[in-house]
Amino acid sequence: LSPNHEALERCRMALDLRDKSDYEGVRQVMLPLWKQVGDVPEVKGLEPAVAAEVLLCVGIFTSWIGSREGIEKSQETAKNLIGKAISIFESLGDSLKVAESRAEIAYCYFREGGLDEARIMLTEAMQKLTPQGSTKARALLKLVVVEWSASQYNVALEILTNNASLFTRISNHVIRGCYHNEFAIVLRHLAEWEPLNREKLLEQAVKEFKTAGNHFRLAKNKVFAACVKNNVALILLNLGRFKDAHKNLEEARRLSVSTKNKVQVAVIDESRAQVFIAERKFKAAEQVARHAVRVLDKS
């Protein structure tokens, strides 16, 4: 392969591995171009469009891995890399790649806690993306996460409902699984605010989680499978089924430890603390919550 063709193929393969949450696989595939978070990728001699694609991909991986590993200033590094890619895409007049890149940089702001900045950038980016396809679907999912993180559950539900047909046409199992996972998360939160429909909403959420889990198994993504287990446990907590909740959390934690995902383990520990509190086991709750805080403080 020519250097340009090889670089593009490595980016494509690495993005596929990202969908499997295979950090080590991504690192190995990108090794000739990029070694680790904090490094600038080697793009000398590549065509501008290819160099921009490499910078964008490395920015995506830096944000993802940096968030997962709690690496300090990783989101700022990712924003700088993606910003360089945007500058090149703009010089080439590639408005679609500019919009795609802005959606990715928006998620860096989200991971730093900048919900308003992320919402504005995602909304602007989606206006310039094509109505169909995985790029638009990924951007929509990012916006849904931003909205429910800001407790805008009805807004998130509206986005998911209005774009249901888009996701049914997507062949990527990770994207489809994420759609059902986010739908279930929103339903679970809405159940807290609508007591009359609580049982119905929670039952629907469980169904959505199961559908998401099926897609993640087909995608061979253990990280997202663990996420589903964690979310199901939170519903069981809402239903007062503490023993079943612990079983799901134990399985979720086992999967997360096997993938060496420290941040996800901390998130699961936070869920365990919630169950312990509901059981009035406050000493156990404090112990696991403190561990979660130590990890999440770094990310």
Image: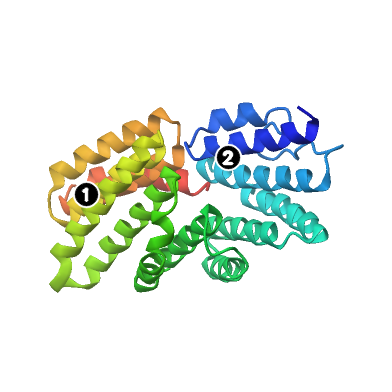
Question: Which of the labelled discs sits on residue 133, or is there none?
Answer: none
Q: Earlier in the sequence, mark 2 or mark 1?
A: 2
| Residue farthest along the front direction in this orientation | 169
Residue plotted at (29% across, 57% down): 184
Q: Is residue 36 above or below residue 175?
A: above
| Quadrant of image for the N terminus | top right
Estimate the x, y position of residue 159 in percent, counting from the top left: 41, 68
Estimate the x, y position of residue 143 in percent, counting from the top left: 48, 64
Between 227 and 246, the one nearer to me in the picture: 227
CA neighbours of label 1 inside 10 A, class few (<14), some (14 to 19), many (20+): many
Q: Is residue 214 left or right of residue 236?
A: right
Q: Is residue 119 above or below residue 104?
A: below
Determine the CA span between mark 2 and mark 1. 36 Å
Q: Is residue 275 above or below residue 125?
A: above
Q: Is residue 88 left or right of residue 11?
A: right
Residue plotted at (47% across, 36% down): 20
Can residue 72 be seen in this snapshot? Answer: no
Can residue 101 be seen in this snapshot? Answer: yes
Residue at which label 1 appears: 275
Which of pointers 2 and 1 indicates the residue nearer the eye?
2
Residue at which label 2 appears: 15
Give amino acid for label 1: Val
Residue plotted at (81% across, 57% down): 92
Secondary structure type for disc 2: helix
